[in-house]
Image (cartoon, rainbow, N blue to C red):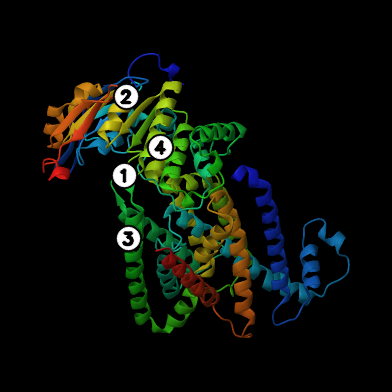
Amino acid sequence: MSSKYSSGFSIEIRGLNWQIGKARILKDIGLQLNKNSFIGIIGPNGSGKTTLLRSISSWYKPDAGTVLIHGRDVLSYTSRALAHEMAFVTQNARIEFEFTAMDIVLMGRSPYISRFGSENQEDIEKSRKVMELTRTWELRDRSVTTLSAGEMQRVMIARALVQDTPILLMDEPISNLDINHQIQIMDLIKGYQRDKNVTVVMVLHDLNIAAQYCEQLILLSRGEIFCSGEPETVLTRDNIRAVYGIDVHIMENPLNGHPMVVPISTLGNPTLT
Amino acid sequence: MIYMHKKKYYRKVYIALLITLFVVVLFSCSVGAADLSMVDAFKIIIQKLPFVGQILIEEPITNTMVSIIWRIRMPRILLAGIVGAALAFSGTIYQGLFKNPMAESFVLGVSAGAALGGAIGMILGISRVMGIGGTGLMAFTGALLTTYLVYQLGRTGGRVSMTSLLLAGMAINFMLSAAISLLMIFNRQRMDNIIMWTMGSFANSTWGKVVLAFITVIAGMLVTRFFARDLNVLLMGEEEAKHLGIDVERTKKILLALSSFIAAMAVAVSGIIGFVGLIVPHAIRLVMGPDHRVLLPYSAVVGSIFLIIADTMARTLVSPLEIPVGIITALAGAPFFLYLLSRKKREM
């Protein structure tokens, strides 16, 4: 899959600026993201996480700077060619039309189907495989309007995986889910990322989830990269105080050694008072 | 079950619908001021088939019967069928593009533009061009110009927001309606004609119109067929559609142009007939699901059947008087619209 790109970065961003009117949402972003890595974008609300992801996906066209996907300007791709390179999962997708779950997953194959053709046996077989992987195969004949949030998110992930792309972009794929579903979905994506050697770039809210699953974190603050690197170097007490404006206690996760962030209430310890 | 697995079933139902359409055409041929049987109608149609017709049906049929069926009723029925198909088909495209079951063929001002064009045509007395009268030609031009204007108004930079389009369409509709009222006040002697025309009628159907409408509408439909899967993907939302490989802006532009062209053609040959483009696509979606590979062809056939029946009622209910067919479709359509509304309310 990603073997056709033997060298260079998966995604490279140079001098990216994006503004609405006079508000500068992204300021001079520069990044180089390695292939086959799991990257988390974190930062407070309004720090530009989603805008950055949408600039990478080319949905937003930057005012200045370039985004290179496998060494080529993202804006120079046709939609169809780009859909062979990256798939996108949005947060809380809702579909109001009564397609079945499998209809939706099959749409992930549309970048490969000619205008004059329709899904072939291979498309159907690939869809079945990712649906089994994402445990959505048993939902295949259900209308997506009847699915729970967790089920829906798994269907959307299945649709992204069946696109067979070396890059997966995900905008808070777990933010509306219960912890059991959060872990299921993160495990699923992590497992897939390792097996298929793809690059995952994910916007995340939950710092502990980010620390546990990501190899590299990018911490955004007011449209700028505050710092980036391994979770241990990014998730420090000072960084979080500077960006989020709260005090935290950082401890080592006893199970896996990743940093764990425990926010400290400004009331001291409210359960004792 | 996915589309590919249900293809056989879809085909069977479609054939059943086509047979229904044929029976409805026969039935409609046989009713009217001069009473004919469906068998006679059938014989006359067969006899008119090229090459085999004369061999299959040898018995002589009176010239008056042939004339009534072939000169008067057939063009009218076929035109109603083509217009019904065109309106339902373009309504399906609009509903898909706007992701809104309340959208219909006329949302972008096709009807108001056509009405204004038609009214100007009548007042200036423009004569016939290419099988459709000057009124029809002016209506067609008015419809396309209006859609183009609405499209330009709804555009911001490189992207077209469907909400702005909808709002621009409404605003232009109001403005043009006011212009039409103004025109009528200054041209009172033509008021009746204009009002009758805007309500839609097939009373002036000719074979020329049938051929012209058939060729153009079918051509538009065939091109649209290749965008049916894109329409499905667009229902996911524009951003998602882009990531699924759709060139969103280009696809929207092509589909808007196709549906406006098809609707404008229908309006040019028949006047403004409402509700067909609203209720038929919606009803088909309720029964068959949202896949446009099914919705588009099914809507066309059912729209055809619906409008032929409506027009048959229009010319026979209070014969020898005619009710404008738009009144019949509105009478049947409005309750359906209210039913949709009540369903929406329950969901909220």
Do labels 4 and 3 touch, CB within 8 Å? no
Q: Write down the quadrant of residue A178 in the picture.
A: top left
Q: Chain of mark 3?
A: B
> Mark 4 vs mark 3: same chain?
yes
Q: Earlier in the sequence, mark 1 or mark 3?
A: 1
Task: In the rendered structure, find residue B168 and report the number of the disc placed on it.
Answer: 3
Nearer-the-camera pick, B93 or A172: A172
Q: Which chain does the residue under circle 4 lie in?
A: B
Q: Position of residue A51 (x, y in %)?
A: 26, 38
- Tell me the subunit letter for badge 1: B
Q: Identify the secondary structure beneath mark 2.
A: loop
Residue B10, position in %: x, y?
Answer: 65, 51
The picture places residue A33, in percent across and down from the top left corner, at 30, 22
* Chain-order first, disc 4 or disc 3: 3
Dot 3: what SS?
Answer: helix
Residue found at x 24% / y 35%: A62
Is A6 situated above or below B308? above
Q: Would you name the residue on which mark 4 appears?
A: B243
C-alpha gap between disc 1 and disc 2: 51 Å
Q: Provide the secondary structure element on which disc 4 rests.
A: helix
